[in-house]
Amino acid sequence: MKYTAPHRRRISPVSSLHPVPRDRRTFLADLGMGFTGLALGSMLAGEDAIGQEAIPAQTHFAPKAKSVIWLFMTGGVSHMESFDPKPALNKYGGMSLSQTPLKDVFNSPFVKDNFRPLVEGSQRNFRQQIYPLQIDYRKRGDSGIEVSDWWPHVGGCVDDIAVVRSLWTTDNNHGAQLQFHTGRHISDGLFPTIGSWVHYGLGSLNENLPQFVVMGKPIASTVARNWHRANYLGSEHDGLTINEKEPLPYGNPAGRIFQEEQAANVELIGKLNQLAAVEYPEDAALQARINAYELAFRMQTSVPEVFDLRDESQTTLDSYGEGYGRQLLTARRLVQRGVRFVQIYHGGGGDPAGAWDAHLNLKKNHTENCQAVDKPIATLLKDLKQRGMLQDTLVVWATEFGRTAGNEEQNGRDHHPFGFSCWLAGGGIRGGVVHGATDELGILASENPHYVTDIHATVLHQLGLDSRKLEVPGRKRLEIEFGRPIREIIA
């Protein structure tokens, strides 16, 4: 009888992804350990460990949300031409600030207490002429909230959205991108980002998937790679950057590896783990590397399934569209499977400051950018709602600051940290409401002002976490003066 070799089912290959290493061997080497030198946890020693659901950490109180989808527009979206209409810009268009009723706005106590280092530069910006609105507004939904014509699709979802028109921050440059994610000025050093705090506080809903996923190109060079770093919380709480078109390269074997061979490798590494546990019982860095490899192993089957869109209807695919829309569809699929925090950036990469940084040609800039994201975002909100997921998925739309009322050049606006907008939807947030306000020209957050960490505290609150109780000894989570949930928008 002719001998037939036993069938050896090959591990399904996965594609490469930048900037994550191309294969598992490179991935492990980048972690500072060779494949045979890595001690793998006992989780991989038997099949029973694979596919088990994680036990989530205890919340401080009953949560209203399970997951967060964080949508960040890099560069600084014009608040007065998005979600905060300012018809007075047309009334005073062409005038200098000194010719308006707000000529002394930078002498207010609010400015002196919080923005003193920024005032001189901002006053220079306003020596230019007041720049009229570049787009019309109209009332949307049953709530009648005014949203600009650059956002018609999101405007159609306004009854599910809470718009906050009174945010402020203290960085007048694009380091504010990092500040919006950590709550700290870039000069204060390295702090955990909001996604890392969620991962740290809540743990995992699904051990086969990463709990903090990042999509989109890197943001401003001023913030380096700290936009998804856990820093002092530990690297195990870092965000994992994934390209939705080419997921999980480090699950791809460097050569031809079959399941039987891999099982033997896993068994050997499990034994090495026992030895390492004796010699290095409290080695946090080693444990982080072990955890990373364990996750990479489990993700070989779980992640490709998330990114396989063949079970989505053509109507759904068409509605989301390609590019940014595909990232949002992937985000829905991730939270549907238990991922805690999905962070998606729009406008990074090519422009070091972000694509929304419209110092020139604001009308062209925002027209093109809004066309790229408006319908996909609205599709995400409608899709989540239709599936019954919006009630426990919190969606946050944000940007690092707004734009000035005065034009920096002939047809653009400069950076503006004194007052700007964001919005939240789902996850126990009231829909169809507006909270806070800026003044007549959109310069200062004049009614119910909120520092950016109030958004952090609100997100954590909806997830059942008290931001104060997350503070690490010697490293306060949020500053004493700020970081409180915005209860007016909580259902």
Image (spheres, rainbow, N blue to C red):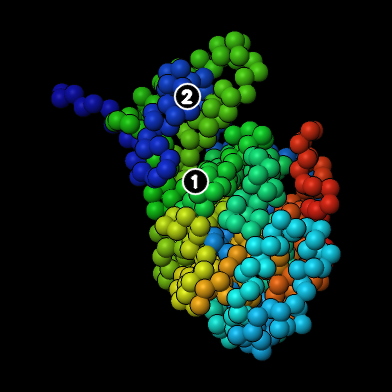
Give the residue at mark 1.
241
Q: Residue 193's x, y, as percent? A: 64, 46
Tell which of 398 and 40 is nearer to you. Answer: 398
Residue occupying the point 68% across, 42% down: 188
As drawn, 317 above or below 97: above
Looking at the image, the residue that sits furthest to the bottom is 91
In the drawing, does residue 389 fall left or right of residue 241?
right
Give amino acid for label 1: Thr
Q: Based on the displayed image, in which of its 4 quarters is residue 281 positioned?
A: top right
Looking at the image, the residue that sits furthest to the left is 2
In the drawing, does residue 7 fall left or right of residue 38?
left
Count numbered badges in the picture.
Answer: 2
Residue occupying the point 64% across, 58% down: 172
Q: Residues within 10 Å of mark 1 (few under 14, many from 20)?
A: many
In whole angstroms, how far apart are the C-alphas of marks 2 and 1?
19 Å
* Residue 310 seen in the figure: yes
Q: Residues within 10 Å of mark 2 (few under 14, many from 20)?
A: few
Q: Based on the displayed image, in which of its 4 quarters is residue 88 positioned?
A: bottom right
Q: Residue 110's x, y, as percent? A: 81, 64
Q: Which mark is residue 317?
A: none
Q: Give the secondary structure at mark 1.
A: strand
Q: Which tag, 2 or 1, sits closer to the chain's start?
A: 2
In the drawing, does residue 256 fall left or right of residue 185?
left
Tell which of 442 and 17 is nearer to you. Answer: 442
Q: Residue 143's x, y, as percent? A: 72, 82
* Residue 48 seen in the figure: no
Give the residue at mark 2.
32
Give amino acid for label 2: Gly
Residue occupying the point 60% across, 79% down: 129
